[in-house]
Amino acid sequence: MAETDIPETPEQARETARQADHARLVELKRSAEAARAEVQAGAYYEGAWDPWRKLAEEYQVELTAHVKEYGGNRYEVEKSVWAALHEAEAA
């Protein structure tokens, strides 16, 4: 049996899931920030902020779910999302 065929332990599977969920949070935050930048660059009209508001709310709901599922400090998780977002932008 090759090393890659060794099944993950439950702890490894949970960490893999946590990392995938964190990556999804980064993408949600990226989408929300892109929507915010788009609105700020354009002319104001009624409902202009609605796409950003929807994405920002979705991000907050998912952030809460992530902290409930995997534990940790909400502030620290959000800080790591921002760090990952800015790290990707710098690359």
Image (tube, rainbow, N blue to C red):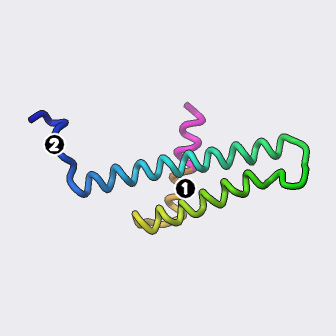
Counting residues from the N terminus, which is met first, the one under dot 1 or under dot 2? 2
Q: Which mark is residue 18?
A: none
Q: Is the N terminus in the top left, top right, bottom left or bottom right quadrant?
A: top left
Q: Residue at x 19, y 36 (%)?
A: 4
| Eye-nearest disc, 1 or 2 | 2
Q: What span is colored magenta in the figure?
A: 82-91
- Residue type marked 2: Ile
Q: Is the C terminus in the top left, top right, bottom left or bottom right quadrant?
A: top right
Residue 63 in the image: above or below residue 86: below
Whether residue 56 appears in magenta in the rendering, the answer is no
Q: Quadrant of residue 50?
A: bottom right
Residue 41 in the image: above or below residue 12: above
Q: Is residue 78 left or right of residue 36?
A: left
Mark 2 is surrounded, within 10 Å at the Cα level, by few (under 14), some (14 to 19) or many (20 or more) other residues, namely few
Where is residue 69? Give x, y as percent: 41, 65
Residue topped by disc 1: 79
Q: Residue at x 84, y 54 (%)?
A: 47
Q: Is residue 49 left or right of residue 76?
A: right
Q: Residue at x 59, y 42 (%)?
A: 86
Residue topped by disc 2: 6
Q: Residue at x 74, y 51 (%)?
A: 51
Task: Name the foreground residue: 89 vs 4.
Answer: 4
Measure how far apart labels 1 and 2 are at the Cα level.
Answer: 34 Å
Q: Is residue 32 left or right of residue 48?
A: left
Q: How many marks?
A: 2
Where is residue 7? Give x, y as percent: 18, 46
Whether residue 90 appears in magenta in the rendering, the answer is yes
- Residue type marked 1: Lys
Q: Secondary structure at mark 2?
A: loop
